[in-house]
């Protein structure tokens, strides 16, 4: 049966793509390729991502005004947040759930980023 296998990428416009890529490299440790984006190696965990529409009036993406949010799976939330703090970026919030730990950052374009360390 023909079906979608998972998320193939996130593509979006930015006012200064190079500066934004540099921020993601500095703050979140992305390895930016020559073509300007990052490729994530497959995780050992059987997880390829989520796709989830939210109601138009959701406040979950605040303080961003963007109509979407990007969630990144991390292996060490505290380590990622320490790297971000060293770059002068503090989380806008944190939350622990039964299925993992979360923290949120806002990038220079105003996009809310959700960091998720899945529970073991």
Image (cartoon, rainbow, N blue to C red):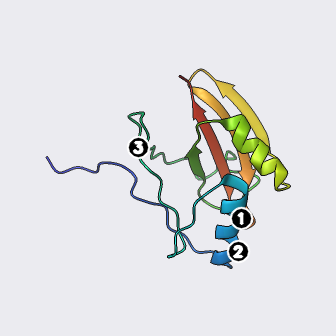
Residue 10's spot in the image, x, y percent?
A: 49, 61
Q: Which residue is mark 1?
A: 23
Tell me the residue at 48%/45% (across/down). Answer: 52
> The residue tagged with tag 2: helix, strand or loop?
helix
Q: Is residue 90 visible?
A: yes
Residue at mark 1 to residue at mark 3: CA–CA distance: 24 Å
Whether residue 115 sits left or right of residue 54 in the image: it is right
The image shows residue 5 at horizontal and vertical percentages of 29, 48
Secondary-structure class at tag 1: helix
Question: Which of these two is toward me, 119 or 82?
Answer: 82
Within-10-Å neighbours for mark 1: few <14, some 14–19, many 20+? some
Q: Answer yes or no: do the residues labelled 2 and 3 have beta carbons within 8 Å?
A: no
Query: At 73% from the left edge and 56% from the top edge, which residue is drawn?
Result: 27
Pick whichever, 12 or 83, lies toward us: 83
Give residue 20's quadrant in the image.
bottom right
Mark 3 lies on a secondary structure that is loop
Does residue 62 sit above or below 18 in this rendering? above
Near mark 3 (Cα within 10 A), the count class, few <14, some 14-19 or many ≥20, is few
Specify which label sits upstream in the sequence, 2 or 3.
2
Left or right, residue 67 beside residue 50: right
Q: Position of residue 48 (x, y in %)?
A: 40, 43
Q: CA distance from mark 2 to mark 1?
A: 6 Å
Residue at 47% of width from left, 59% of height from top? 39
Q: Are marks 2 and 1 in contact (CB under 8 Å)?
A: yes
Which residue does the numbered mark 3 point to in the structure image? Answer: 48
From this view, report whether residue 28 is shown above or below residue 99.
Answer: below
Residue drawn at x 70%, y 47% as measured from the top left: 59
- Considering depth in this image, is 103 or 76 the residue closer to the camera? 76
Residue 19: numbered disc: 2
């Amino acid at each position: 049966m023909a079906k979608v296998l998972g998320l193939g990428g996130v593509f979006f416009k930015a006012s200064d793509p190079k500066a934004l890529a540099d921020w993601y490299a500095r703050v979140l440790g992305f390895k930016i390729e020559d073509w300007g984006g990052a490729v994530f190696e497959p995780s050992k965990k059987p997880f390829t991502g989520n796709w989830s529409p939210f109601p138009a009036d959701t406040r979950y993406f605040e303080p961003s005004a963007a109509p979407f949010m990007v969630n990144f799976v991390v292996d060490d939330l505290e380590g990622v947040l320490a790297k971000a703090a060293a770059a002068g970026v503090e989380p806008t919030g944190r939350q622990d759930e039964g299925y993992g730990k979360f923290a949120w950052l806002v990038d220079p374009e105003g996009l809310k980023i959700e960091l998720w360390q899945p529970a073991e």
